[in-house]
Image (cartoon, helix red, strand yellow):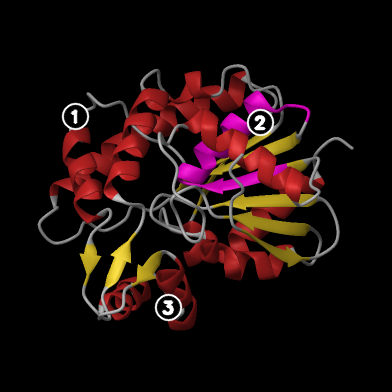
Amino acid sequence: MTLLHAHDYGGDGPQLVLLHGFSRSLADWDAAAAHLTAGHRVLAVDLPGHGRSPRVSPWTIPAVVRDIAETLDAHGVPEAVLVGHSLGGMIAVEYARTHPDRARAAVNLDGFWWAGDYPGAAQVSAGLLATAGAIAPPEYVEQKVIAAGRFGIPADHAETAARAAAQPLPDGTWQTLPHRAEATEIVDELHRLSAPGVTALLEGVERPLLLVQAGRQLPPAPGMEWFAEFSARFAQEVSAELDVVSRTRPTVSVHRTDATHLMNMEAPAAVATLVADFVRGLPA
């Protein structure tokens, strides 16, 4: 059994469990959770190898889903709506597939990935892995705060999130998370899970789903100008699949929000409203 680090935000109402994205932590949810606790009981979880949760090997989606279930048991959460961002969104959907008796519904916030042979996928994966498990300079947190400011994310929230997603080292530098070994396994898992396409990801999920796609693209980092074309092409393909899914699967709702991939930090109030409206409309 692997119990994951969790934070209970409190609140009263339907139970929500919040999951973060790759290389992030549950602190990403601080601002959105402040809105959600007005009508929900809110618990957030650090995925394995992230934040303050223990490392695991091998890092596989089925194992992570089991870890989440065991962690929720330890916190007395028999049923919940799973809300995940990015990697966490894909895991939320998998939780709903494999634990239909425990997942009332799931929300996937821009958790869409591409197959390993998708044009440009190797470059994106290489970029992610280059920063995973690296030793970052003492000014790492300051750099993260500056970068987050480009998206209107408040400095105090950005600093808390940056500190929570990395480990401070005695010499003042930072260890980024997850470590390289786990990061490689995560990317392999994402490629495996996404190879059949977005529609196939939803097969076998009987619980209600809310799929939220970013309406604006992330600006490319210096030296990665090609990423703009890559992300625009992929977003268009995902959008086409989601349009079909929304017409053919009555239990699936699709929404496009006026935010980038960082939506849960960039637009926490809007994301909280989306989730609250979705939960309010669920069958009793």
Direction from residue 150 to residue 135 in the image, left or right: left
Residue drawn at the location 70% of the way across and 22% of the way down:
206
Label 3 crowd (10 A; few <14 / some 14-19 / many >=20): some
Q: Is residue 254 magenta?
A: no
What SS does tag 3 mark?
Answer: helix
Residue ID for mark 1: 119
Q: Nearer the viewer, residue 237 or 189?
A: 189
In the rendering, which numbered label is found on residue 20?
none
Q: Earlier in the sequence, mark 2 or mark 1?
A: 2
In the rendering, which numbered label is found on residue 96?
2
What's the magenta region?
Answer: 81-101
Q: Quadrant for the C terminus, please.
A: top right
Name the spot of residue 234 as percent of width and height, x first. Answer: 31, 35
Image quadrant in which you'd find residue 232? top left
**Distance between mark 3 and mark 1 Cα atoms:** 34 Å
Name the spot of residue 194 as percent of width and height, x first. Answer: 39, 26
Residue 16 visible in rendering: yes
**Distance between mark 2 and mark 1 Cα atoms:** 30 Å
Residue drawn at the location 36% of the way across and 52% of the way down:
178
Instruction: Identify the residue at the far right of this view.
Output: 284
Q: Nearer the viewer, mark 2 or mark 1?
A: 2
What SS does tag 2 mark?
Answer: helix
Direction from residue 173 to residue 205 in the image, left or right: right
Q: Which amino acid type is marked by label 1?
A: Pro
Q: Earlier in the sequence, mark 3 or mark 1?
A: 1
Q: Earlier in the sequence, mark 2 or mark 3?
A: 2
- As drawn, 169 above or below 261: below
Label 1 crowd (10 A; few <14 / some 14-19 / many >=20): few
Residue ID for mark 3: 159
Q: Are marks 2 and 3 in contact (CB under 8 Å)?
A: no
Instruction: Identify the residue at the far left of this view.
Output: 223
